[in-house]
Image (spheres, grey):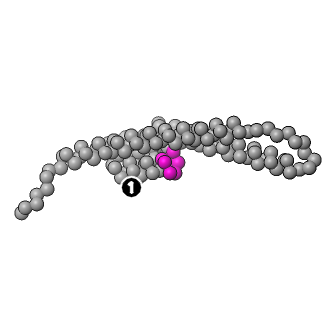
Amino acid sequence: MRMKIFSAAGPVSSGTARNCFLLNQFATPGLGSLMGRRILPGLGQLALAIAGCALVIAWYALTLMQAYELTDINASASVTSHARLGEGGAVAFLASWFWALGTSLSLLRQAKGADQASSMNVPPRITKI
């Protein structure tokens, strides 16, 4: 059995919506949106999260290289700040996280509505036989 990621048929179940929420908020922003069949927002969230993470890693690497150069006695003491990279990366990652939060809440709301609609189609249970 193959999982159809790009299938847009029907709303997601409440269990799937909950898993999408957990994946978006506690793993990687965008992956839960993709799992919940929100392809374009999911790809945007994932790209923004990866870009933010790459900027933070670049800031960290540049800061470490500069700190290592300062340990050399013969090196000149020119220090330049790369804080803008780290700040920009953090802002980008937080933006993707909040975007994923909005998408996750939308998925949960849609799943709740679908569950309520499907429960209305079920006849009442017969208890006396």
Q: Is residue 47 visible?
A: no
Identified at 47% across, 50% down, the residue is 23
62 on left or right of 41: right
Instruction: Give the magenta-colored segment's residue range.
Output: 24-29
Residue 78, position as x, y percentages in the image: 85, 39
Q: Is residue 35 left or right of residue 84?
A: left
- Identify the image quadrant of the C terminus: bottom left
Task: Name the residue rendered at 90%, 42% in the picture.
Answer: 76
Look at the image and say whether residue 25 sits in the magenta stretch.
yes
Amino acid type, mark 1: Met
Q: Position of residue 119 (x, y in %)?
A: 22, 48
- Residue 35, image x, y percentages: 43, 47
Q: On the image, which quarter does residue 92 sit in? A: top right
- Is residue 72 one of those drawn in magenta? no
Label 1 environment density (alpha carbons within 10 Å; few <14, some 14–19, many ≥20): few
The quadrant of the rendering that contains the N terminus is bottom left
Which residue has dot 1 on it? 1
SS at mark 1 in the image? loop
Farthest residue to the left: give it: 129
